[in-house]
Image (cartoon, rainbow, N blue to C red):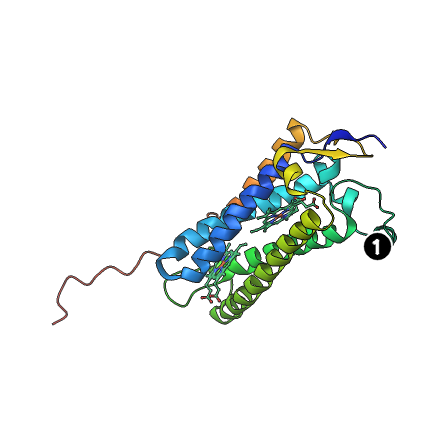
């Protein structure tokens, strides 16, 4: 059978992925350092919020192989894949589980982080909307899910290494260049400039909501007493 070159991953999907790698790594590092690094942790978290919301919208309006509907795993596609009869391109049905798993865990991490506090000086930007008790519980959950996320990332890397060395399928190159050599399958279509702008605007709106900039400003600290009380 002849091999042809197709456009698999569009630029926004690739940019999303590699920016996610950089910022999630930075979030894990700054979260673990804590203390003075927490202000950066919060800013990095807001960038990840924008990236994930962008990807969620791009999964609906982006180019064909990046759309969730094109790789959503079903019992039929999973059976076909496990029998070696799956003929698609893009995320295979098993890989799709890890994609949705990673996105779900990162989303959980974001939602809990926005309301968390470190019991020292840092509070998530939406902390004021809930009680201290609930914020403490969400902070505990945030720490737990960060471990689950790290475990899933390690599994993700093992799966990619397995594909490269055992199945002789280099998944990384298409995630960098966009192109893949295949026996069958078509290049991605759709996901033009308008779709990109819509996804970008929705992502920016989500960052604005997550940043808490719309919340009323906290009351100024009580003025220092200047006149003696005697
Ligand atoms: C913080 C670390 C990482 C996270 C959170 C992460 C997350 C993800 C996500 C969410 C996807 C789905 C992409 C999409 O459809 O939008 C994905 C796919 C992919 N990732 Fe990562 N990733 C990480 C690290 C890496 C690294 C270091 C590599 C390369 C060595 C890598 C290689 C890939 C590849 C090749 C795919 C496409 C898999 C396929 O063809 O089905 N990832 N990753
Ligand atoms: C994918 C995004 C994120 C990742 C991977 C992440 C990861 C982490 C990690 C690893 C820790 C240390 C946990 C521990 O020591 O037990 C942490 C703590 C923390 N993070 Fe995040 N985080 C993310 C997003 C956010 C966001 C968006 C915010 C708020 C803006 C936030 C606020 C906090 C707070 C307040 C703590 C301290 C919790 C405590 O001391 O109990 N995080 N995060």
Which residue is tagged 1? Answer: 82
Residue 78 lies, with reference to residue 184, above or below; the image says below
The foreground one among 10 and 155 is 155
Image x and y of residue 73, in percent: 79, 51
Res. 218 visible in picture: no
Q: Nearer the viewer, residue 177 or 46?
A: 177
31 left or right of 224 in image: right
Residue 94 lies, with reference to residue 1, above or below; the image says below
Q: How many marks?
A: 1
Answer with the quarter of the image where residue 87 lies: top right
- The answer to whether residue 173 is above or below residue 74 is above
Quarter of the image for residue 181 reads top right
Residue 111 image-quadrant placement: bottom right
Query: Relative to 139, is 55 on the left or the right?
Result: right
Q: Quadrant of the N terminus?
A: top right
Residue 47 drawn at (x, y percent): 51, 45
The residue drawn where x is 14% and y is 63% is 227
Helix, strand or loop at disc 1?
Answer: helix
Residue displayed at 61% across by 31% down: 197
Left or right: residue 136 versus residue 85 is left
The percent coordinates of residue 52 (x first, y second) are: 60, 47
Dot 1: few (<14), some (14–19), or many (≥20) neighbours within 10 Å?
few
Relative to the observer, which residue lies in front, 22 or 190? 22
The residue depicted at 49 percent of the width and 62 percent of the height is: 116
- Across and down, in percent, residue 101 comes to 67, 56
- Residue at coordinates 15% horizontally, 61% vertically from top-left? 226
Q: Residue furthest top?
A: 193
**Residue 75 shows in the view:** yes
Task: Out of 222 and 60, give the one closest to the viewer.
Answer: 60
């Amino acid at each position: 059978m002849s091999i042809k070159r197709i456009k698999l991953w569009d630029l926004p999907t690739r940019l999303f992925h590699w920016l996610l790698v950089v910022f999630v790594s930075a979030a894990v590092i700054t979260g673990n350092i804590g203390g003075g690094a927490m202000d950066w942790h919060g800013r990095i978290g807001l960038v990840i919020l924008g990236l994930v919301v962008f990807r969620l919208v791009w999964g609906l309006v982006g180019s064909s192989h990046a759309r969730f509907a094109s790789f959503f795993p079903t019992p039929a596609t999973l059976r076909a894949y496990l029998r070696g009869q799956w003929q698609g391109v893009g995320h295979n049905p098993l890989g799709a589980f890890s994609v949705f798993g990673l996105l779900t865990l990162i989303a959980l991490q974001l939602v809990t982080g926005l309301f968390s506090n470190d019991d020292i000086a840092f509070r998530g930007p939406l902390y004021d909307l809930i009680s201290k008790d609930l914020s403490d519980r969400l902070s505990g959950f945030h720490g737990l899910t960060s471990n689950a996320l790290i475990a899933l990332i390690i599994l993700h890397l093992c799966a990619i290494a397995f594909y490269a060395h055992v199945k002789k399928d280099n998944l990384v190159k298409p995630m960098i260049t966009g192109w893949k050599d295949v026996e069958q399958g078509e290049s991605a279509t759709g996901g033009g400039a308008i779709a990109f702008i819509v996804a970008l605007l929705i992502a920016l709106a989500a960052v604005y909501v997550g940043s808490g900039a719309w919340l009323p400003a906290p009351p100024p600290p009580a003025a220092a007493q200047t006149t003696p009380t005697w």
